[in-house]
Image: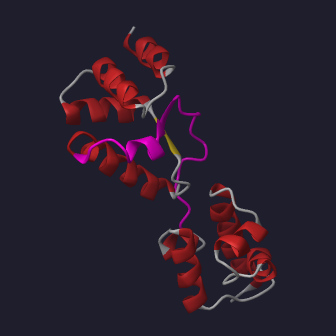
Amino acid sequence: MSSEYAKQLGAKLRAIRTQQGLSLHGVEEKSQGRWKAVVVGSYERGDRAVTVQRLAELADFYGVPVQELLPGTTPGGAAEPPPKLVLDLERLQHVPVEKAGPLQRYAATIQSQRGDYNGKVLSIRQDDLRTLAVIYDQSPSVLTEQLISWGVLDADARRAVAHEES
């Protein structure tokens, strides 16, 4: 493995770890010592080669597909303007699947495309809300009210939707 590739791989590992709010010692604690902070840190710096087996195990620990850790697979979107709507994914899990199923599948697809696996919140764009409104056969403003009532979307979302519809 070239040192440049190892550094890129390490950067991806660090990004996933920090996205999940974990320090190196947090990884060691959460894994009950399976992953030593010094070892994970050396992988992240590119100082130590990681085997395919260990990379697969680390991906499993972080709950992400292995391909998300490989260099050259960075999802697009870094240059896009900041999103205005934020879904609470933790609350979404408590909404009955017969109501939230389409939203859960849509959110999972966005997470996969962006490589965003923090699992707590997900930013969506106005276009995403319009697409969801079509799926739910409602106007964006009615869907926004529904998502707010589920606790999945903050009440501030009303302003973003009202601004978009005016």
State the extent of the magenta-drawn residues as a range: 73-97
- Whole-percent x, y for residue 30 in the image: 65, 70
Count of picture labels = 0
In the image: residue 38, left or right of residue 80: right
Instruction: Find out whether residue 77 is within the magenta segment.
Output: yes
Q: Is residue 107 above or below residue 22?
A: above
**Which quadrant of the figure has residue 69?**
bottom right
Viewer-nearest residue: 107 or 131 = 107
Report the magenta stretch's main SS: loop
Q: Residue furthest top?
A: 166
In the image: residue 141, left or right of residue 44: left
Residue under the point 69% across and 79% down: 5
Q: Is residue 65 above or below residue 120?
A: below
- Whole-percent x, y for residue 88 in the image: 48, 39
Residue under the point 18% across and 29% down: 137
In the image: residue 75, left or right of residue 33: left
- Whole-percent x, y for residue 43 in the image: 74, 80
- Whole-percent x, y for residue 35 in the image: 69, 81
Viewer-nearest residue: 116 or 118 = 118
Residue under the point 53% across and 83% down: 56
Residue under the point 49% across and 54% down: 114
Q: Is residue 91 above or below residue 41?
A: above
- For the C terminus, the image quarter is top left
Instruction: Find out whether residue 138 is within the magenta segment.
Output: no
**Which quadrant of the figure has residue 135?**
top left
Colouring scheme, one of rainbow, by chain, secondary structure, one colour: secondary structure
- For the N terminus, the image quarter is bottom right
Q: Is residue 165 above or below residue 27?
A: above
